[in-house]
Image (cartoon, grey):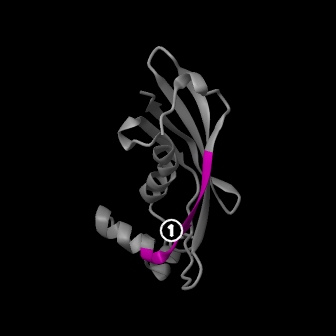
Amino acid sequence: MSIALSELATGQEIGSATLEISRADLIRYAGASGDFNPIHWNERFARGVDLPGVIAHGMFTMGAAVQLVTDWIGDPGAVIDYQTRFTRPVVVEDLVDTPGAVVEITGVIGALDADNSTARVDLTVTFNGQKVLVKAQAVVRIW
C-alpha cells in the first residue's frame, strides 16, 4: 500500500485494533526481553507490592500499540520516532479460555510536515475505558 502525504489530513483516522493479552503472552515477552520481574507473572508478588494484580510490561503495551502504525504505513522502518508516557497499568487476569486483558488502540493523524515528508500519528490506547498511554505519538516518513 502506498500512502501519499497529499492524501492525508489532520484528524484523519488510520484505523483501530484490539489487543487481547494473556498471561502466556507476558511470559513469552519476558523471555524475549529478558524482563522477568515477578510483577509480570506472579500474582502474590504483584499484590504484595501494592499492584492490583499481574501487569503487562509497559514496553510490551507500547510495542503492541505501535503495530497499528506499522501495519498502516506498511514498513516498520518508516517509523522514525515513537514516544509515550505510561499512565496506568494493564492488569492481566489469569484466565484460560478468554483474554486476561483487552486493550483498544486507535490512531489519527495528529500533524503533517510537508517539508520533511512526515506524518505524526497520535495513538489512543485504553484498557477498561481508561488511557494507559498518553501522548503516544509515532512520526512516520511518507516516501
The x, y position of residue 33, in whole percent, is 31, 62
The x, y position of residue 15, in whole percent, is 61, 46
138 and 115: which one is in front? Answer: 115
**Residue at the image position 39 percent from the left and 41 percent from the top:** 75
The residue stretch that appears in magenta: 15-24
The x, y position of residue 102, in whole percent, is 61, 66
Q: Residues within 10 Å of mark 1 (few under 14, many from 20)?
A: many
Read off the residue under disc 1: 55
| Whether residue 123 is visible | yes
Question: Relative to residue 70, is residue 61 depicted above or below?
Answer: below
Was residue 20 drawn as part of the magenta stretch in this picture? yes
Question: Relative to residue 53, is residue 5 depicted above or below?
Answer: above
Question: Relative to residue 55, is residue 109 depicted above or below?
Answer: above
Quadrant showing the C terminus: top left
**Residue at the image position 44 percent from the left and 79 percent from the top:** 42
Tag 1's secondary structure? loop
| Whether residue 36 is visible | no
